[in-house]
Image: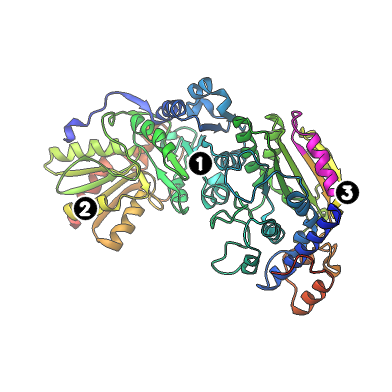
Amino acid sequence: MSDIQYLKKVATQVRRDIIRMVHAPQSGHPGGSLGCVEFFTALYFGGVMKHSTNFSMEGKNEDVFILSNGHISPVWYSVLARSGYFPVVELATFRRLNSRLQGHPTTHDNLPGVRIASGSLGQGLSVAIGIALTKKLDGDKQLLYVLTGDGELQEGQVWEAMMFAAHHKVDNLIVTVDWNGQQIDGPNEKVMSLGDLEGKWRTFGWEVLHNDHGNDMQSVLDAFAAAKTKTGQGKPVVVLMKTEMGFGVDYMQGTHEWHGKAPNDTLTEKALAQLEETLGDY
Amino acid sequence: MLNNITSIGKKATRDGFGDGLYEVAKANPQVVALCADLIGSLKMEKFIEAYPERFFQVGIAEANMMGIAAGLATGGKIPYTGTFANFSTGRVYDQIRQSIAYSDKNVKICASHAGLTLGEDGATHQILEDIGLMKMLPGMTVINPCDYHQTKMATIAIADHHGPVYLRFGRPSWPMFTENMPFEIGKALMMSEGTDVTIFATGHLVWKAVEAAKALAAEGISVELINIHTIKPLDEAAVLASAAKTKAVVTAEEHNYMGGLGESIAGLLARKLPTAMEMVAVNDTFGESGEVPQLLEKYGLEAVNIIAAVKAVLKRK
């Protein structure tokens, strides 16, 4: 089996995990999670990040990932568990009382892999910049990876952070924007237009890359590879990644309807019928 | 003992922060600092000159500053953030709540120009609610030192205390009187023992409480004066022991009476040792522009107000 075939198998299982995780408590955010499966699978399984499942908060001499749009926790939890950060069976506790798998990620319960709480939007980029600065101070050559939503860019703090990263030449930082064009109340363009998103990042002093196929594994791997070549050159790097919300489940695909809604028993069955059990369900 | 408490001159508490930051950075290479365009106001120049690579200017962007500080702490640094108290708390409450307090980050939020004594800038900048905002956050340590030396000692001490800290200090030149006194986070400082009434004071109002206690002593009223520099965690044993002894309590602080030191002590006493009590604090109002002495007089934070509160509580004893 080629590497890419294996990554696709992982991605299919992660999609099954997402559906089952939100189905059990009838709560969670499947839409954005499904849209970012290729991103997370490539990041953790595709050799993009140097990381260790022997988790340390400081992450010295490792690449560090920060999830800013914490509501897509199902995809992250699934990938972390499937990578070996914690037992896969723990995915069954998602959003349940006394679980480490809170609705939105937190460090509060020492879940390996998570370095900051996220959920209240717009904060992750600032945190990642802080870790990136620490790496520079310590002579640590590894990188910071950040994922942010597109609707999330409506938060003012993001633009403060963008300005800072360019001014202070934080060039050990790769941000990816999950540009699915949707948010809770509808399309970005209707709720609050992002306008010339590329131009905005560029004029803020960032190196801007595009990935127009964020649900194509090879395209995601290529985008990470291209982004890496742009680091260390005095500019922070952003990848504007086009994805489709709900990708992989036909009735969830391309609509904001499943942003924060769990499927019922029938629809769960329908979704799982479209997703082969490749690595074994928890 | 009361007569031994004398002012050896005046300096601002923010000068104590600046000098303390320099010293703690010299001793601990993990200490870094951030500022949101208020280097001079926070007295951070000496640190920046000595350790330019450990300083981060964030511009007028306090929310981003709190997030970056959380990231620096994640990586193992001990970040000190510097801006005015208003912009250190109210403006960035959600960032502190999620990225620092809930995430248990070792960030030291250092806040100058707190309270009315900021003076002429007026109510937009005179935050009187910050202690309340910060003490409500689980895991947050809240410290409000009373003079130059105590602020300097606190600035140094918080580096060795793991966890988020809110360190509150101020703008004006203020009497210095704690040079030879100890400082320990979470431990009340007994300044003068007495028998008739206890005054628990914090921040700038400690000096006003010293003046009040001296005046009351001249009238034959024995005051036990206790400085509560650490509002959270509150030294409950010290508060209860003194309240049990004097059976009358007055609190004094440069803060809204809601959410402040007085409220913390009232809550403790209500639960464990109901005691007659009066609060000297701002009466749930915003401040205004004016000179420091004028403001303290108008808003009832002078020694005379503490004296009046003592006399009132003694009648209820």
Q: Quadrant of the N terminus of chain B?
A: top left
In the structure shown, which secondary structural element does the residue marked by tag 1 occupy?
Answer: loop
- Labels 3 and 2 positioned on one and the same chain: no
Q: Which residue is mark 3?
A: A212
In the structure shown, which secondary structural element does the residue marked by tag 2 occupy?
Answer: helix
Q: Residue furthest left?
A: B220
Judge left or right: residue B54 versus residue A212. Answer: left
**Residue shown at the point (51%, 41%) measured from the top left:** B107
Q: Is residue B304 magenta?
A: no
Q: Which residue is mark 2?
A: B241
- Report which quarter residue B201 is drawn in: top left
Q: How is the image coloured?
A: rainbow
**Residue shown at the point (57%, 48%) measured from the top left:** B99
Q: Determine the chain carrying the residue at label 1.
A: B
The answer for how far apart the CA atoms under marks 3 and 2 are is 69 Å
In the image, residue A67 sits, relative to residue A267, either above or below, namely: above
Q: Which residues are magenta?
A: A219-237
Q: Determine the chain carrying the residue at label 2.
A: B
- Report which quarter residue B54 is drawn in: top right
Q: Is residue A233 magenta?
A: yes
Q: Amino acid at mark 3?
A: Asp
- The answer to which of A1 and A95 lies nearer the viewer is A1
In the structure shown, which secondary structural element does the residue marked by tag 3 occupy?
Answer: loop
Judge left or right: residue B149 versus residue A64. Answer: left
Q: Residue furthest top?
A: B49
Q: Amino acid at mark 1?
A: Val
Q: Determine the chain carrying the residue at label 3.
A: A
Task: Indicate which disc, 1 or 2, sits on the residue closer to the N terminus.
Answer: 1
Q: Is residue A186 visible?
A: no
